[in-house]
Image (cartoon, rainbow, N blue to C red):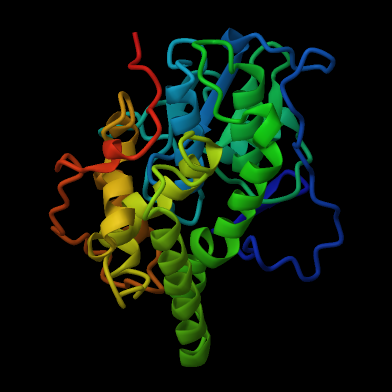
Amino acid sequence: MGRLIDGEWRTDITNDDTEDVDLEPTAFRAEIGPDGPHPPVPERYHLYVSRACPWAHGTLLTRRLLGLDDAVTIDVVDPHRADDGWEFSPDKAGCTPDTINGSDYLREVYTAAEPTYTGRVSVPVLWDQERETIVNEESDEIMRTLADAFADHRGVDLYPEDRREEVDEVIEALYGPLNRGVYAAGFASSQAEYEAAVETVFDALDRWESVLSDQRYLLGDELTLADLRLFPTLVRFDAVYHTHFKCNVRRLVDYPNLWGYTRDIYQMDGVAETVDLGHIKEHYYRSHDDIDPTGFVPAGPEIDFEAPHDRDELPGEPPEPLA
């Protein structure tokens, strides 16, 4: 995948290779709030996402559970990311055009906000339609600012003020070993590096399997942003990470608590509509030709996310059904 350098798309420079680039990266790291340039008016915001990307998935879950579907609009890029980066393919199932800026590629959204932008081009992107600029491009920060600004929209508080430090600590604990750990295994450059990464991944899965043995959610009886950070990794695990990234010591379905937890969240009102396994599998198996040079998308596995679970016997309630 390429990178924008001073507003120009460069396919010879990846997100991890900035050698010989003597320019400071552009940063979009603002928040929605009453005292800044981006006030908490939901109808003015727009999300650019990929349904394949676990980072973007977290923002879609936050939007859905806050009841912002009609207020915060979205556009969806093609799951197959090639040399030109994320592309808008409106004729493809589940994809849309860029309804805000009329772009062909997501990089044009970045240069619409900053013509000399330097840095990565990634999803998700939170766009302010009134100011015609990017608010933020960091998934965790987008999730937090949506949850903070719009908790009262339907009375769902995914980032309770008195527990934010705990939520942030769990998100941090998930990030390196698990959310990024599967990628460290998949893109390892040596056998030793791969084995170390896989060990880290399964140590993390073992840890959270134990945590979830006697509590419904990661912080006990309350669904928070931490759960919305773990779920996208788990829901992709058996379809992608187990095979494509060779994290095949065990499957998700071999973990009774994690597998039940995944089904519990999947079956919450509105969550299933955020999961597109077709987009997920196409992205990973077709976009990473250094790992899967054939580009063949596997037919399986068959995963029954609708199977009954007994997580509701533990203390805690899911959010009220969407109206």
Q: Residue at x 13, y 54 (%)?
A: 302
Q: Residue at x 61, y 29 (%)?
A: 126
Q: Is residue 312 left or right of residue 202?
A: left
Vertical comparison of 65 with 6: above or below: above
Vertical comparison of 204 with 220: above or below: below
Q: Is residue 7 left or right of residue 192?
A: right
State the residue in front, 323 or 83.
Answer: 323
Spot occupied by residue 168 in the image (x, y as percentages of width and height): 66, 45
State the residue in front, 32 or 19.
Answer: 32
Spot occupied by residue 237 in the image (x, y as percentages of width and height): 33, 59
Quadrant in the picture for the N terminus = bottom right
Q: Residue at x 74, y 12 (%)?
A: 39
State how many labels appear: 0
Spot occupied by residue 76 in the image (x, y as percentages of width and height): 42, 32
Q: Is residue 47 left or right of residue 29?
A: left
State the residue in front, 72 or 117.
Answer: 72
Vertical comparison of 106 with 318: above or below: below
Quadrant in the picture for the C terminus = top left
The reply to whether residue 276 is in sight is no
Spot occupied by residue 103 in the image (x, y as percentages of width and height): 53, 29
Q: Residue at x 45, y 26 (%)?
A: 75
Q: Is residue 156 left or right of residue 296?
A: right
